[in-house]
Amino acid sequence: MGRLSKFLSQIQHRLVVQRNTLAVRYKKVLGRAYVRLSILQAEIYLRKTGPVTVLIDNSALGHGITHETAWINTGKVLWGGKIPVDTGYSARIAVHAPDSSDRIYREVTYLVGIAELAKRGHIKLVTSAELAAESWRQPIGRFRGYQNQDLSIFDGISMPSVDGHHYDAIDPKAAQQARLARSTEEPFVTLARMLPKKSNLDAWHIHTAHKHGLYCFLAVDFPLVENYRVALQRKGFPQLDTKLMLPSELAAAIQLRPIETFAISYEGSSWFVRPELHTPDNRRTSPRQGTVQFNPPEQPDMPDSEPQPETANSPINILPAVGKMMGASINYGHQAVGIQYKDKSGQLHQLNMPLGDAMYLLSILKATQLNLDIPFPDDPRDPNATPIRPSERVK
């Protein structure tokens, strides 16, 4: 009877794993189909007219982070039957709610399609020396995401510079402003005079797009667009061979439909995804704020546990046994390691520990492997690596 029960438990576990795997694959396929249909009309249009080259602003790249990594609390368990500890796991969530009426989200829904068209070669996204110099003095996570489950729609897209690079080692902001102040090129000088003083760098980006004959300068900057439209009506505004455009304006010009970001939640995902969740304020989270956390419904307090005499068969702890290892992630600033796994019923769990403790655990396990001559791949990042025993390794 015991063997039958164990066998049935194993079958149930495999069915749960298969169901979850198929569900994720189905959602990925469905999301890709939705994106493909949404860009189809624009793709047909651009095949007829030819690809367009777009100078993309850092503001658009920053809003291209459509998903972030959140912590999903799953309540408390008793460690060793005595000590209550918090449990949970990290998962990808959307930045914006799908029903958000925010102006920025409307522009982001068009950015998704623009990025997809760029991946297919119908739009060529480029940067410039001054845009790169501007981004290098910002936190790198602002344009790529701060955690490993964050999703950037521009990931994997090559964006060459149209005019080289500037490397400002000392006071880069002042060096960049000094460089612009020395310039006497037109139409930059006129644009800088007609736009607010704080927009002189944007004036240079528009100048760069004009100078290199680019289709437009793409930005998600509403004050800049408003000031530009006002300046456009003034006498003496220069004749330009380019445009300043919001993503929605570029989309209208190439017949691109908006794409809700929740539909791409599973794009490139390797861990847990919660597409129904989003950041509380529909904004990206600053590293200073820490990871967004979602708490389970309120639970009654854990009962006080009186110390019990140890018995020979008492467990060290009651963490669920591992059914399948999912992987590990390093949180903000490499301060902590989260080890994610599923138990035998398919439930998600994550065990967190300081990075130093995780490395110490790794050294203990490595010593165990060497002592017991346990086979293990030389490089576990390679899915095709063949496990070998330490004693068989070629010196």
Image (cartoon, rainbow, N blue to C red):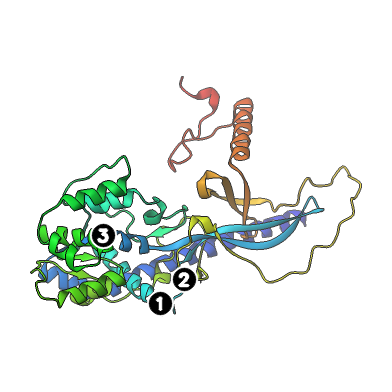
Q: Position of residue 236 (x, y in %)?
A: 9, 72
Please indicate, yes or no, whether residue 247 appears anywhere in the rendered image. Answer: yes
User: What SS does tag 3 mark?
Assistant: helix
Q: Earlier in the sequence, mark 2 or mark 3?
A: 3
Residue 9 lies, with reference to residue 387, above or below; the image says below
* Residue for point 47% across, 61% down: 68
> What's the mark number on residue 102?
1
Kind of residue at disc 1: Asp
- Distance from label 2 to label 3 (Cα)? 26 Å
Residue 366 lies, with reference to residue 13, above or below; the image says above
Crowding at dot 2, Cα within 10 Å, few <14 / some 14-19 / many 20+, comes out as some
Q: Earlier in the sequence, mark 1 or mark 3?
A: 1
User: What SS does tag 2 mark?
Assistant: loop
Residue nearest the viewer, comparing 183 with 384 = 183
Q: What residue is shown with label 2? A: 282
Q: What residue is shown with label 3? A: 119
Kind of residue at disc 2: Asn
* 391 lies left or right of 321: left
- Distance from label 1 to label 2 (Cα)? 8 Å
* 337 lies left or right of 74: left
- Distance from label 1 to label 3 (Cα)? 27 Å
User: What SS does tag 1 mark?
Assistant: loop
> What's the mark number on residue 172?
none
Kindly check if marks 1 and 2 are in contact, taking CB atoms under 8 A apart as contact. yes
Q: Earlier in the sequence, mark 1 or mark 2?
A: 1
